[in-house]
Amino acid sequence: MSEVRLRFAPSPTGFLHVGGARTALFNWLLARKQHGTFVLRIEDTDVTRSTQQSVDAIFEGMKWLGLDWDEGPFFQSDYFPVYKEYIDKLVAEGKAYKCYCSVEELEAKREKALAEGGKPKYDGTCRNLPPQEDDGRPYVIRFKTPKEGATTWNDLIKGKVSFENAELDDLIIQRTDGTPTYNFVVVIDDVTMKITTVIRGDDHVNNTPRQILIYQALGAPVPVFAHVPMILGADKARLSKRHGATSVMAYRDMGFLPEAMVNYLVRLGWSHGDEEIFSLQDLIEKFSIENVGRSAGVFNPDKLMWLNAHYIKTGDPVRLADLLVPFLKERGVDPAQGGPDLVSVIKTLQERAKTMLELADGALFYYSDELSYDEQGVAKAFNADTPALLTALVEKLAALPALDQAHIEQAFKELMAEKGIKLGQVGPAVRLALSGTTASPGIYEMIEVLGLAETKKRIERAIAVLAK
């Protein structure tokens, strides 16, 4: 293991969304590439909004994507005594102070600053008060931000970023109820967990100078930062529910494969030449945070669908069968209770399916006891000669030495030669009899998968129901 340590630190206030999943993925890939450590930390200090349901959803999403962690999960709520020690240390060293200004006073100061054309930041009223005994008045603790100079860092994605310290106010690091604030606990966690590299969304850029100053005040190493551009919808607005699902697990429920989602997320901002298809192992070998672009990625559902179709088409039918079972059960079908082999069924469908939902819908006719028939198809495919042709076909299939596609094709050729017909005069009727529709897998494939007995049963039923 190298000394490189990265972390993913979501807040458990909802599902694992697309942007968070991409951030987790970038951290995970860099940790794996550099043989470092990937830490999972749950930032649950917002006790009013954090829920166990959200924690479970984050774990479920990461496991579905294949993003395993080396250390954790750690929960910030378990470390309040540690945060208190660091706050007390900063106060004792004169690097933080108690602020007794009331909410009303602070609002008045902000309004005055705005009226004078200034920025509505804290004016430092309590900054230089001498230490005093608590007299029962509520107070917050503020970090004493340097007034001179600038805070600068070399961002792995954005390049050099700099903030004038005079533009930063004295950050509250402890609320009146004694709980620490986000910008403070993040630093303490990264210090105690020895995080060396922080990859996060660029909505955190404004937090970074404040956090760097706290690292410096503690005499702790400052990690390397990389701020990833946000993900936008097609209208170039920040990705939200109005653009479609933003939960990673919603895409699983819509029939997307995790490898398609990983492949798509990594390409939202990162590139490796003109390549589009990447396995996880490919990504570990080729990923570089420096190749993440500075502009926002635009979420394109069509591109995700294209990738998903590719992974279904090229996927292992055995694995796809395992993944498909829950979708079939939702549709009232349990392949374990009988019917054709599910792996064989999938082989006939995966060439054309774009999602697992399509794959499940396409498989239903294989497990149906009584098909309904497409009326327009029936009108085109069935005529007075059809029953005799179908009956003759069943006889030829029954006489085959083996019911594989090569022999099945030969049976059709013999029938066509004997009857002087073309495939179009019998094939559509067979398709309807076996699947109930005019759009299905290949006729020879279906017969092979259904087997002789089921094929005979379906053809005989179609003759009885549809023959006129």
Image (cartoon, rainbow, N blue to C red):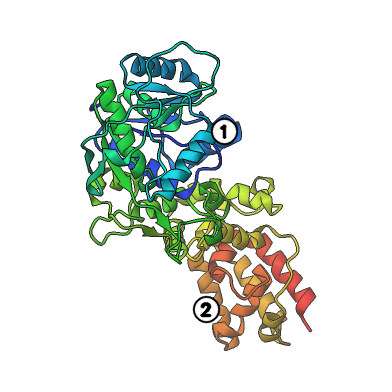
Residue 117 spot, x, y in % from top left: 38, 51
Residue matched to label 2: 413
Residue 308 in which image quadrant: bottom left
Is 295 left, or right, of 54 in this rendering?
left
Q: Residue 212 bears which disc, if any?
A: none
Q: How many residues crowd around disc 1 within 10 Å: few (fewer than 14), some, or many (20 or more)?
A: some
Residue 423 spot, x, y in % from top left: 55, 82
**Type of the residue with mark 1:** Ser
Residue for point 39% across, 19% down: 87
Residue matched to label 1: 50
Residue 46 spot, x, y in % from top left: 53, 31
Q: Quadrant of the C terminus?
A: bottom right
Residue for point 50% across, 66% down: 352
Confirm or deny contact between disc 1 and disc 2 (CB under 8 A): no
Give the camera-side residue of 327 and 127. Answer: 127
Cα–Cα span, label 1 and label 2: 67 Å
**Type of the residue with mark 2:** Lys
Give the camera-side residue of 347 and 219. Answer: 219
Give the camera-side residue of 52 and 381. Answer: 52
